[in-house]
Amino acid sequence: MLFELRNNAAERVSHCGVLEFIAEEGMIYMPYWMMENLLLQEGDIVRVKNVTLPKGTYVKLQPHTKDFLDISNPKAILETTLRNYSCLTTGDSIMVAYNNKKYYIDIIETKPSNAISIIETDCEVDFAPPLDYKEPEKPIASASSRATAKGEKLF
């Protein structure tokens, strides 16, 4: 079962699966990161609707920080983490825990729609540069390096 979660007050929508049905009637329990995606505070009203989502074929991810790229095998860590998710929604952020550190990753594009099921699907994954990534500056050639590049003698 997959659900659309809607916070009408903030005009935010996300999607999720269910771990277990243990909440009292009229209540839901959700992880804090999901509450952040929906801009919810404890006790806020959420509209819950059962939905069917298409199987995902493509997702584009953007880590918040470039230190995610320092993980020795980010692909394996991501594959393991995504097994805990049943669906992804464009605009959401997910959290990847690795080596006692939390890495946040934005879902910036999903295909074939803005919300996809990732259960038993082979999904192409692409990465955008991390939010804190800066393009390396090209070194400015000094007068001596320009002269030697042209084959001129400096002495």
Image (cartoon, grey):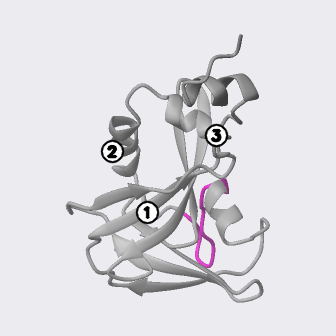
Label 3 sits on residue: 136
* Residue at the limit of the structure toward the top, as seen here: 155
The answer to whether one can see residue 107 in this image is yes
Identity, as a three-letter code, of the amino acid under mark 2? Glu
- 28 falls in the magenta region: yes
Is the Cβ of the residue at disc 1 closer than 8 Å to that at disc 3? no
Q: Which of the marked residues, 1 or 3, is nearer the chain's N terminus?
A: 1
Magenta-tinted stretch: 23-32
Element carrying mark 1: strand
Label 1 sits on residue: 60
Foreground pick, 139 / 59 = 139
Q: Quick one: label 2, few (<14), some, or many (20+) residues within 10 Å? A: few
> Residue 57: x and y, percent?
26, 70
> Residue 150: x and y, percent?
56, 31
Q: Residue at x 44, y 67 (%)?
A: 88
Quarter of the view holding residue 87: bottom left
Task: Check the image and report above or below for 134 versus 111.
Answer: above
Element carrying mark 2: helix
**What whole-number distance in Å separates the C-alpha atoms at marks 1 and 2?**
14 Å
Element carrying mark 3: loop
Q: Is residue 112 left or right of residue 102?
A: left
Q: Is residue 40 left or right of residue 76?
A: right
Identity, as a three-letter code, of the amino acid under mark 3? Pro
Foreground pick, 137 / 48 = 137
Task: Check the image and report above or below for 146 versus 35.
Answer: above
Task: Check the image and report above or below for 81 versus 2.
Answer: above
Q: Which of the marked residues, 2 or 3, is nearer the chain's N terminus?
A: 2
Label 2 sits on residue: 79
Q: Is residue 53 left or right of residue 21?
A: left
> Residue 82: x and y, percent?
38, 51
> Residue 70: x and y, percent?
52, 28
Q: Residue at x 28, y 60 (%)?
A: 124
